[in-house]
Image (spheres, coloured by chain):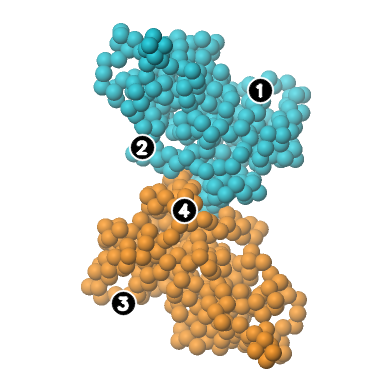
Chain colours: A orange, B cyan
Amino acid sequence: MSSELRNLNEVTVRAPATVANVACGFDCLGFALETPFDEITLRRVDRPGIRIEHLDGFGLPTDPARNVVGTVLGSVIRAAGGDLGFEAVVTKHIKPGSGVGSSAASASAAAVAANELLGSPFSRPELVEFARDGEFTACGARIADNVSASIFGGFTLVRTTEPTADVIALEFPELHATVLHPQIEIKTADARALLRNEIPLPTAVRQWGNVGALVAGLARGDYGLIGRALEDFVAEPYRKVLIPGFDDLKSASLRAGALGGGISGSGPSVFMLSANGSAARAVESAMDRVYSGSGIDYNIYVSPVSRTGAATFR
Amino acid sequence: MSSELRNLNEVTVRAPATVANVACGFDCLGFALETPFDEITLRRVDRPGIRIEHLDGFGLPTDPARNVVGTVLGSVIRAAGGDLGFEAVVTKHIKPGSGVGSSAASASAAAVAANELLGSPFSRPELVEFARDGEFTACGARIADNVSASIFGGFTLVRTTEPTADVIALEFPELHATVLHPQIEIKTADARALLRNEIPLPTAVRQWGNVGALVAGLARGDYGLIGRALEDFVAEPYRKVLIPGFDDLKSASLRAGALGGGISGSGPSVFMLSANGSAARAVESAMDRVYSGSGIDYNIYVSPVSRTGAATFR
C-alpha cells in the first residue's frame, strides 16, 4: 500500500534524443534513438507551484518560467485546471546545443511524467502540444518535430503544425543510427539564417519527391529506396559549411555501409542510418577515423531507432 | 500455329488515363484510372519505318516525327538497334488537352505494345523513358508523372527524373476517382506560367509534409489521413482561376463524401477521390449539379483507381 501510494505520487520518465529533418524531411520528419536520453523524476506535492532541481552540470536556469521542464509543467497545470504542485529532479544526458533534441527530450519527459502522475488524462497529441511550449522556452519557436519523435518514438512525420501538430507514426523496418556530435556550438538562429527564405520550385519538387519516397521505403522496408531518398537540397548545401569535415564524414560513412544521412536537426551533429547494428558500428569507426585527427572534441552515439518514445523508467 | 504467328506480329494495348500531381504531389505523384483509355494496335512489318493511322477524330498529325506514338516507336527502334518496321492504328478515347494524360496514354500504349512485339526486352523503367520522349513531342518536356502512372498502373511516385525517372509503385487501398472534364482549353504553358518560380520555405514544408502523409495514408489505408493530406499550396491557389466553378465543385464534392481532390495535372479536369464506388457516384451527382447550369460542356468519369497499367487487350 505504501509502495502503491509512492507510485501515484512519483514517477521517473526517460525521453530519448531525436534526429529531426532526416535529410529530405526539413521541419517535418524525425526519429527517436534509444540512447542518449534525458531523465526526470517528478513528484506530486501538496504545496502548489513548480520546483526544479538539475542533477546535471549544464548550468540551466531552474526558474520554472525560464526552464523547459518548468514551462511544460506550467502548461500541464493550466490544462488540468488545478492548483497543483510538482517537484522535478532532472538529469540531462543530452548536451544542450548538440542537435539531437536536447530540449525536446526534457520537454517530452516532463509532459509524459506529469500526465502519468495525473492518471493519464491527456492524449499523445496533447502531450506534444505541452512539450512544444517547452521548445518555445528553449529556442523561441514551438518546434514540433523533435518532441513528436521523442513522445511517439520511432519515425514520425509532422504533417502540419496548424492549428496543432498532426503527428503520424510511420511504419519502419529495423534501422540503426550513428550520430557524431562535434563539440562545437551552432546557434539555431545562425543555422536558420543560412537558409533561403524562398526555394526554386524544381528544388522543392525534388525534396518532396524524396519525402514521399522515404515514407514509402520505410513502409515497405526497402533499404535501397531509403538510401536513395536520403538527399537534402534545402538545408545541407548551406548548413554543411558550419560542420568541419562534413563531406568527408558522409562519404566515409557511405563507403562503410551507411544507407545515407545528413545533418541532425540544425547541427552540429551528423547522423547516418544503417540497416543493421554491425553496419552502424562500421560507420562509427569510419566517422572516428575522419574526426580523430581533427583537433575537435566529439562523441559518437550508436543506437537502434527506438520503437518506444518517452516512457516510465521505474 | 497461324494464330500464334499473328500474336507475334500484332498486339493491341490499352493504356489508361491518369491524374498527375494529385493535390500535394506536384510533378511527382500520379494515379491511373480504368477508363477512359487510349488503344493502339501495333503490327511488325518487314518494311522498315513507322506508319501511323488514327481512327479517332482529333486531327492529330500522322507524321511519325510529330506524333506521340511515332516518337515513342522511334525511340524503341533506336534502343533495339534494328532496322524495324511498325504500323500503328491508334484509337484515342482521351481528348487531348483534358488534363488526364491524353498524350501520356498514347505514349505508354506505344511503348508497351512495341516491347510486347519485340519479346519484352525492356524493363518498365525503360518503357517510361521511351514514353517520356512522346511527352516531349506533345508538350516540349519529358514529363514523367503521367506516363509512369499509365505504365505501372496504380498510384506512382516519381522520386526524381535525374538522370532517369525513379518510379515507385505505391501501396494503396481501394479508391475511386470522379473526374470532371470541362470542355475548355487550358494550354499547359499557360498553366505553368501562373506558378511561382520560387516558393516560400514554409509553404514548401507544408507541401512535403502532405506528400509524406499521403504516402503513409495510402500505405496503411487510412482514409482520414489521405483526405487531410490532399491539400495543394503550390498550384491550386493560382491555377484554379482557370477552371470555372472550381471552389463550388470542390466543396460540393466534399459534402457528397469525397476524401479530397484538386486539379488533375495542369487542368482543366478536376478530380476527387472516394473510398468506395457509391461515394464516387454521389460525387459525380454533386459535380453534375454544379456544372449542369454552367453553360459549359463537360464529361464526368467515374472509375476505380486501376491496379493495372497499360496492358495487352487482346
Quarter residue B117 falls in: top left
Foreground disc of the pair 3, 2: 2
Q: Which label sits on residue B37?
A: none
- SS category of the residue bearing label 1: strand
Q: Both on one chain, marks 3 and 4?
A: yes
Earlier in the chain: of badge 2 and badge 1, it is: 2
Q: Which residue is mark 4?
A: A218
**Amino acid type of the residue tagged 1 in the rendering:** Asn
Residue B15 vs A50, above or below: the answer is above
- From the viewer's perspective, is residue A290 above or below residue B230? below
| Residue where numbered disc 1 is placed | B299
In the image, residue A44 above or below residue A68: below
- The residue drawn where x is 65% and y is 49% is B224
- The nearer-to-camera label among 2 and 4 is 4
In this rendering, does residue A236 appear at all?
yes
Residue identified by numbered label 3? A297
What amino acid does circle 2 point to? Answer: Thr
Image quadrant where one finds the N terminus of chain B: top left
Q: CA distance from mark 1 to mark 4?
A: 39 Å
A59 or B193: which is nearer to us?
A59
Residue B87 in the image: x percent, y percent?
39, 11
The residue that appears at 48% across and 67% down in the rendered structure is A306
In 3D space, how far apart are the residues under numbered discs 3 and 4 (Cα atoms)?
A: 33 Å
A244 relative position to B254: left or right: left
For the residues carrying marks 3 and 4, which lies nearer the camera in this image?
Answer: 4
